[in-house]
Image (cartoon, grey):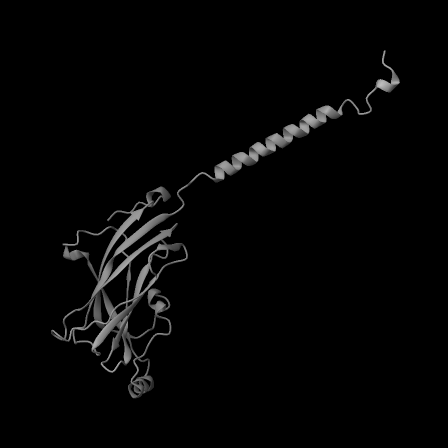
Amino acid sequence: MSLPGNQSSSPSHEKPKQKLNKNKKASKCAKEKSSTEMDSKPTASYFSLSITGQIVSATFPLGPDQEFVFLRYELVAGPDWQLASGPQHGLTQLATNKSGHFNEPIVFNMPIEVTYKSTSPFGWPQLLVSVFGRSGMGRESLLGYANIHLPVFGSRPTTDQNTILEAPILMPKCPNMFADVTSWLLRREPELKDPKVLLNSMKCKGLSMESYGSLEFQLHTIMRGARKLGYNWHA
């Protein structure tokens, strides 16, 4: 027999509720922990492309218009590509072939070493080169543009002549006679406002260009992680 003063003021069904709330909190914490552990697991989400080599030389069959020649290059890739290491822009030294024959190659041997990361081959990187000449008085003028896709596969040994890649040097032409006369009077060759239009076949449609010479490249490729993403290329 219990006295009225000894009875507990809280209802008897509150303790099971507290246990249920604790169990719910524990299960919720366990779910959050498992989800964070799953998110932290490393997964292959990209492949890498490493390019090493050099811009070897420029050749002008009729000789360059200027005494010295130098190059400016830029690497251009699609939105899925990220430059992991290496310079995106570059400038070569002044070079000339005046000591030899007028159509001998003008040697630069400009080194190129870059690494890209990507999740898709769309927008494969390209190398865009602008060729400039400089006279003995220091006056600079455009000699043309050249572009080439970075190689997909690894190349052969350097002793094989097939490792040399060649791209034409294209010079823009004036669209009409009036522009041609103006260019001659001002002694300025026509230039493209944005040379990157040469990398898009749709944007450069209708441009008037002429071949002025050629650039030689020597590039080597190492690719990693492509098969994990389902890409299986064969040379």
Extreme-left residue of the structure: 101
- Residue 26 falls in which quadrant of the image? top right
| The image quarter in which residue 148 lies | bottom left
Residue 101 location in percent, x, y?
A: 11, 74
Q: Is residue 57 above or below residue 136?
A: above
Q: Where does the image place residue 71, in percent across and percent down from the top left?
A: 27, 69
Task: Depth check: give the residue in front, 16 or 167.
Answer: 16
* Residue 14 screen position, x and y as percent: 75, 26
- Residue farthest to the front, as pictured: 5
Q: Position of residue 69 (x, y in %)?
A: 23, 73
Nearer the observer, 85 or 38: 85
Looking at the image, residue 168 lies above or below residue 223: below
Q: Quadrant of the N terminus?
A: top right
Residue occupying image coordinates x 34% and y 70%: 195
Q: Residue at x 27, y 59 (%)?
A: 112
Which residue is at 39% across, 55% downward? 82
- Counting labels gives 0
